[in-house]
Image (tube, rainbow, N blue to C red):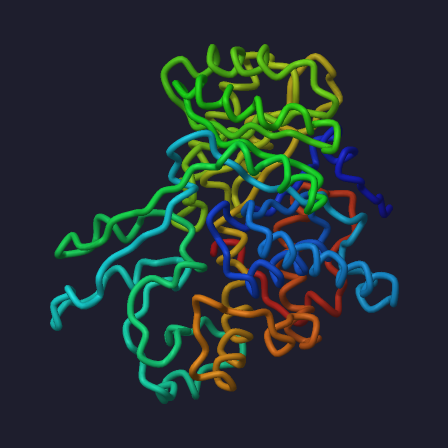
Amino acid sequence: MTKLYTPLQSLKEGRWFKLICGASFQHLPAVRNLTLAYTLAGADCIDVAADPAVIAAAKTALGVATSLVESGLAQGMGYSNQPWLMVSLNDGEDPHFRKAEFNPNACPPDCPRPCQTICPAQAIVFEPPPTPPESLKQAKPDQPLTYPHSPKGFSGVIDQRCYGCGRCLPVCPSQLIYTRSYVSTPTTLAELILSTGVDALEIHTQVGHFTDFKRLWGAIAPWMHTLKLLAISCPDGEGLIDYLWELYHLITPLPCPLIWQTDGKPMSGDIGTGTTRKAVKLAQKVLSANLPGYVQLAGGTNYHTVSKLKAAGLLTTANPIQPFVAGVAYGSYARVLLAPILDQLDHQYHEANHDINFQAFPLSSRANLENDPHRLAKAVALAHSLVSQLKSVSKPVPDELRRLVEINPTR
């Protein structure tokens, strides 16, 4: 039986799915296409950077998804209702809000460039030739690309692609890479929230940040009535539960639902299956505190997260006394899952625009997923393979979509 979920209903029933595009990820074509694919696959929430251009790209994708559903072109793809659009802010220094930087001219000519290899966002590039190598020309249509997408003659970090995971920092043989952090400015937040029409807000904080959180909350609180949801994301730390209770007493009463996002192992879901254990363990810890609100996993979540939640008895239960996890947010794993398809779209765009300036990377119809029906179907099928784990009674992947893609659960 098919059941349609609204975002709030998903929260209440423990079937909430959130896509994290990245608090520092500003690659507009990727944000747009990820939003489109996961919206059509049935996501409940799309979390993006608090950047007007990024928000606009996501909202454009939501509009495209609605038009595809209304025209019948997305029938059977898993879409239930339009997801809520969320923006992420930080109350102080936070790894989600930073960018990698280095001077490429200081790199030794014989450096093996492990930073370029390890970067999951393909954000580090070194002066590629003007034409792709033969290996790329012979690649299969949706095979991951080894050729970096960058303008002719550019070396360094593509700022819009970097989302601050920090994996490049320890592997640089010459230790040339550093990070640039930024903190949300409270005076600009109210205008941002009101002018963009977002549905939800997420605040990233850490134990010991109460003074900074309180300052940020002072700017946000007068506008909370315009939002449908508030999420507070926090990693583990000594005194975590006491800190979360302190935040709860500060922000209540609230005019909207509250999510506690347990950030197990930030930005690591694509590294390996073991990263999800820390996320599950932290969720158990917060659930046991019986904080008012919903608990949702993040940080290290991947294909195995739902099965581990089931094994731990943390998903929806008929016993109202037993607490359960309301949902899961997927970031790096969800993005990497669709990377082979989106990389091909990027490559097609750059084939026609060799001299593009990445620092002013525009949206282009050439890179829009909906203009390639075959790749759109594959992207949605892959996205749905993740979304459907939480929505077991929702629409299965249609046969015609399943035939287009071989889903690999061990990826």
- Picture coordinates of residue 78, whole percent (x, y): 76, 54
Image-based side of 7 in relation to 381, left or right: right
Q: Residue at x 52, y 58 (%)?
A: 337
In the image, residue 371 above or below residue 378: below
In the image, residue 390 above or below residue 225: below
- Picture coordinates of residue 254, whole percent (x, y): 70, 19
Residue at the extreme front of the image, as rendered: 187
Q: Residue at x 80, y 49 (%)?
A: 80
- Picture coordinates of residue 145, whole percent (x, y): 42, 74
| Image quadrant where residue 224 sits | top right
Image-based side of 207 in relation to 385, left or right: left
| Image quadrant where residue 357 sits | bottom left
Q: Residue at x 58, y 58 (%)?
A: 31
Image-based side of 221 in relation to 400, left or right: left
In the image, residue 336 above or below residue 250: below
- Picture coordinates of residue 8, whole percent (x, y): 77, 33
Q: Nearer the viewer, residue 132 or 188?
A: 188
Total labels: the figure holds 0
Q: Residue at x 54, y 47 (%)?
A: 49
